Amino acid sequence: MRVFAAVVVGVLAGAVAPVGAAVAAPCLGAGAAASGVPAELRAYAPARLAGLATGVGVRVAVIDSGVDVRNPQLKGQVAAGRDLLHGAADGRRDCVGHGTAVAGIIAGRPAGVGGVQGLAPGATIIPVRVSEDTDADGRQQTRSRSSADAFAAAITWAAGPANADVINISLVMPDPDPAVRDAVAAAVRSGVVVVAAAGNGGAEAGVAYPAGFPGVVGVGAVTPDGVLADYSQPGPHVDIAAFGDQVTALAPVRGHRAVQGTSFAAPFVSATAALLRERFPADSGAQIVARLLRSADPAPGGVRSARYGAGLLNPYRALTEEAGPVVAAAPAVSAVPVAVAGRGPAWERAGVFAAGGAGLAVVAGLVAAVAARGRRRGWRAAHDTPGHDQMPG
């Protein structure tokens, strides 16, 4: 059961109309503490990644609904940021919980006996609050909406005064607004890695922005089996895919919630970019992106596609491989079963996520073949559909 099935949809374009009547919604409260290690973290293995990098010294801007720093796993992880909804110099408030979930996936600290944490717990989160729209069960609950101008200002501030190394955008807009496009272009030119959700509009939806702008890493969502989620929006804007379905994330106040959507796949990629920033400090933003894409595990079909981009995120390979294979085609991953001791059937079907250890990484390397990236094309972002995580836009 999805406890947090749909949240903050997007916004951005100043003229996005609500699906239904606007209603006031109470702020989300605390969640229950999750036990055990979620499937996505069994695959990405943050404890193993910590021996290589934790993201220390790296600043990750989360342009979202703010971040609730009351959750103990975010203690000391979050800078003041900005609240562009209210013109305040502090983005550490989150009524809908979306930005808090994103921040926890990136930099949540390990806590207690549970296994929920971020991939880059040494990174600093910079919250930039631009939206508080929510969508649940097909009915949008609009509390406040940001404009494209405010969104562009958020990107500009994050890349400039905030000195962000990575920008995570789990918001979408339907049109390529010029101000947002220019802000993204300036951030990319300055060396910032910009990551955005590919949208939750499903197969019928078109390109979403800002992920659709050149230089942005568009992220699709896969299920625990490594298969594209039915809501994940395919297209030329998809550069890579990551876990986004049945993800366990931090809740406001304390505890955890189950979430889904490309909004929550994007921060796994942002966290990996933060790890790469620490491990390879001399790399440019473009080189960090190249490492992300060339180290991806092969998705079903084995070659670059509109559904999975370059393939499935593999943080361990990204951190350990100097160069990935460049092959025209590769066998479908479904034909290459990978068994991992102690894992359940879902993990075995998702053997493409070979981050559990060096041996598994070698196995994945033998079967992995990521199509050459061709040319730098426009990259795209995320729409969320009713019943799934969403951000206005």
Image (tube, rainbow, N blue to C red):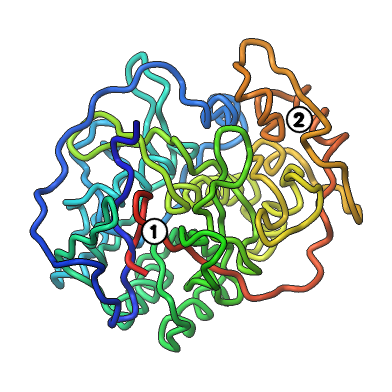
What residue appears at the point 67 percent right and 45 percent down from the top-left corner?
312
Q: Position of residue 28 (x, y in %)?
A: 16, 43
**Residue extending furthest toward the right:** 328
* Quarter of the rendering occupied by the C terminus: bottom left
Left or right: 1 with respect to 87? right
Residue at the disc numbered 1:
61
Can residue 351 be seen here? The reply is yes
Occupied quadrant, residue 130: bottom left
Residue placed most toward the observer, 96 or 126: 96
- Disc 2 to disc 1, C-alpha distance: 30 Å
Residue placed most toward the observer, 341 or 160: 341
What residue appears at the point 73 percent right and 45 percent down from the top-left corner?
299
What residue appears at the point 23 percent right and 56 percent down from the top-left corner?
80
Question: In the rendered view, would you say 385 is above or below 223?
Answer: below
Left or right: 279 with respect to 321? left
Query: Neighbour class for label 2 at 10 Å: few (<14), some, many (≥20)?
Result: many
Query: Neighbour class for label 1 at 10 Å: few (<14), some, many (≥20)?
Result: many
Q: Position of residue 20 (x, y in %)?
A: 20, 66
Residue at the disc numbered 2:
361
Can residue 323 be seen here? The reply is no
Residue placed most toward the observer, 35 or 84: 35
**Residue extending furthest toward the top:** 342
> Helix, strand or loop at disc 1?
strand
Residue type, label 2: Ala
What residue appears at the point 54 percent right and 41 percent down from the top-left corner?
243
Q: Position of residue 333 (x, y in %)?
A: 78, 37
